[in-house]
Image (cartoon, rainbow, N blue to C red):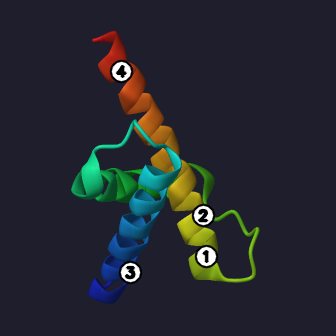
Amino acid sequence: MNITGLLIALAIGAVSGFLAGKIVKGHGFGLLGNVIVGIVGALVFGALFGSLNLLNSEILNEIAGGTIGAILLILLIGLVKKVV
């Protein structure tokens, strides 16, 4: 992966984290925390499931997958924080 690909992946993760924070209200970690969780969630979702191919645009597919991954990660972290 070159520097351009890395920057695009970071931007997609940031957008995904922002969207996940808006969707999962009350469980987020603030803007910066959600962006970081979005980046990690997008990477994890992409590694596990690849691209969804639900939409006509590759970027929108990546954002959708990253958002799903970030939502799942936010909920999982929320559950762990609640238990501990």
Question: Residue flagged by tag 1: what amino acid is it?
Answer: Leu
Q: Is residue 83 visible to the viewer in this orientation of the structure?
A: yes
First in sequence: mark 1 or mark 3?
3
Could you tell me residue 22's position as x and y percent? Answer: 46, 54
Q: In the picture shown, does residue 65 fall above or below 61?
A: above
Q: Is residue 44 visible to the viewer in this orientation of the structure?
A: no
Instruction: Read off the residue under disc 4.
Output: 80
First in sequence: mark 4 or mark 3?
3
Question: Residue flagged by tag 2: what amino acid is it?
Answer: Ala
Which SS class for mark 3? helix
Q: Residues within 10 Å of mark 4 (few under 14, many from 20)?
A: few
Pointer 1 and pointer 2: residues touching (CB < 8 Å)? yes
Question: Residue flagged by tag 3: what amino acid is it?
Answer: Ile
Camera-side mark, 2 or 3: 2
User: Residue farthest to the left?
Assistant: 32
First in sequence: mark 2 or mark 4?
2
Which SS class for mark 4? helix
Instruction: Read off the residue under disc 3.
Output: 8
Instruction: Read off the residue under disc 1.
Output: 60
Camera-side mark, 4 or 3: 4
Q: Is residue 33 left or right of residue 45?
A: left
Screen quadrant of the C terminus? top left
First in sequence: mark 2 or mark 3?
3
Which SS class for mark 2? helix
Instruction: Read off the residue under disc 2.
Output: 64
Q: Is residue 20 left or right of residue 27?
A: right
User: Residue farthest to the bottom?
Assistant: 4
Pointer 2 and pointer 3: residues touching (CB < 8 Å)? no
